[in-house]
Amino acid sequence: MVMYRVRVDPGLCKGCLLCVYICNKRGGGVLRRSGVETLLGGFLPECRGECIGCRWCERLCPDFAITVEEVGD
Ligand code: SF4
Ligand code: SF4
């Protein structure tokens, strides 16, 4: 079974949380706001659960800060 890993680049992410919005609206509902601040004073997203690999977050991130990778099977 293919699984997915979500990576956020803290050097690119401004913390707008658009990815969290779309993950909960159209994706697997696994992205949440973390407690880690970004350089611009927002908060990094984090994946809490099993990502379904829909890539909505990756496509909508304005800063190309989030990537979804297939891992193992
Ligand atoms: S990963 Fe992209 S969409 Fe998500 S909070 Fe960071 S900048 Fe915004
Ligand atoms: S790929 Fe889909 S399910 Fe996985 S974190 Fe992004 S929006 Fe959520």
Image (spheres, rainbow, N blue to C red):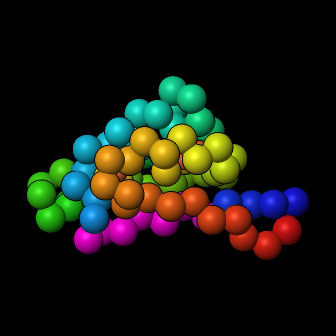
Identity of the residue drawn at 44% across and 58% down:
66
- Say left or right for 19 vs 69: left
Check the picture and name the quadrant holding the C terminus.
bottom right
Classify residue 14 by image quadrant.
Answer: bottom left
Say if 61 sits above or below 65 in the image.
Answer: above
Image location of residue 60, percent across then percent down = 43, 42
Image location of residue 27, percent across then percent down = 59, 36
Image location of residue 18, percent across then percent down = 35, 39
Residue 9 falls within the magenta-colored stretch: yes
Q: Point out the residue furthest to the top here.
A: 25
Residue 50 falls within the magenta-colored stretch: no
Task: Name the residue nearer the viewer: 32 or 55.
Answer: 55
Res. 36 visible in picture: no
What segment is highlighted magenta in the picture?
Answer: 5-11
Res. 45 visible in picture: yes
- Please state the total of marks drawn on the protein image: 0
Identity of the residue drawn at 32% across and 47% down:
62
Task: Name the residue nearer the viewer: 63 or 40.
Answer: 63
Identity of the residue drawn at 70% across and 65% down:
70
Image location of residue 55, percent across then percent down = 58, 47
Identity of the residue drawn at 51% across and 26% down:
25
- Say left or right for 15 vs 61: left
Say if 45 sits above or below 9 in the image.
Answer: above
Check the picture and name the quadrant holding the N terminus.
bottom right
